[in-house]
Amino acid sequence: GDYDLSAHQKASGRDLSYFDDIKRERYIPHVVEPSAGVDRTMLTLMIDAYHEEEVRGEQRVVLKLHHAVAPIQVAILPLSRKETLTALAAKVEHELRPYFRTEYDDTQSIGKRYRRQ
């Protein structure tokens, strides 16, 4: 409704009405009050996370979520598939899991694993 602007107009003594040139009439515009909700929260998080970067002369869009809302906080990506290294990497992931949202990945090449993160 127009309560917000009407009340502000009354309190401030300023004319906050709008004159419509086509209809040739003056009125107080209705105001849509913003509200909190998941949609607005997600939009804010995504705007904050949106980044553009240039790589080899090309622009790309990257989503850099704040660590508090990132689905993965720590990724364990062993450089090779040697049993000694993968066992140690799995142990590190297991020890970090109670404190962080972790992901362990030893599939495909290390470059592809980095890119998925």
Image (cartoon, rainbow, N blue to C red):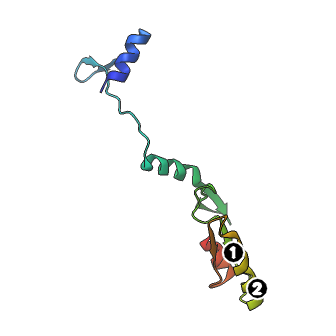
Judged left or right of residue 46, residue 2 is: left
Q: Please determine whether, in this image, residue 10 is positioned above or below residue 97.
A: above
- Location of the N terminus by quadrant is top left
Q: CA distance from mark 2 to mark 1?
A: 12 Å
Front of the two marks 2 and 1: 1
Q: Is residue 33 left or right of residue 87?
A: left
Q: Is residue 41 left or right of residue 73?
A: left
Q: Nearer the viewer, residue 97 or 84?
A: 97
For this rendering, which residue is in front, 101 or 53? 101
Q: Is residue 34 above or below residue 41?
A: above
Kindly state the secondary structure of the residue where label 1 is placed: helix
Q: Residue at x 62, y 54 (%)?
A: 66
Residue 33, compared with residue 94, is above or below; it is: above
The circle on residue 85 is 2
Check disc 2: other Cα within 10 Å, few if <14, some if 14-19, many if 20+: few
Q: Residue furthest left?
A: 23
Residue 43 visible from this viewpoint: yes
> Which corner quadrant holds the C terminus?
bottom right
Q: Quadrant of residue 63?
A: bottom right
Question: Which residue is at a point 67% across and 67% down the rendered structure image?
Answer: 74
Furthest residue toward top: 13
Q: Amino acid at mark 1?
A: Glu
Q: From the top left corner, tell me how far across and down residue 95 is, in percent.
A: 71, 72
Under circle 2, the secondary element is helix
- Residue 50, image quadrant: bottom right
Residue 91 location (% of width, % of height): 72, 79
The residue that mark 1 highlights is: 93
The picture places residue 79, in percent across and down from the top left corner, at 74, 82
Q: Residue 16, can we see it?
A: no
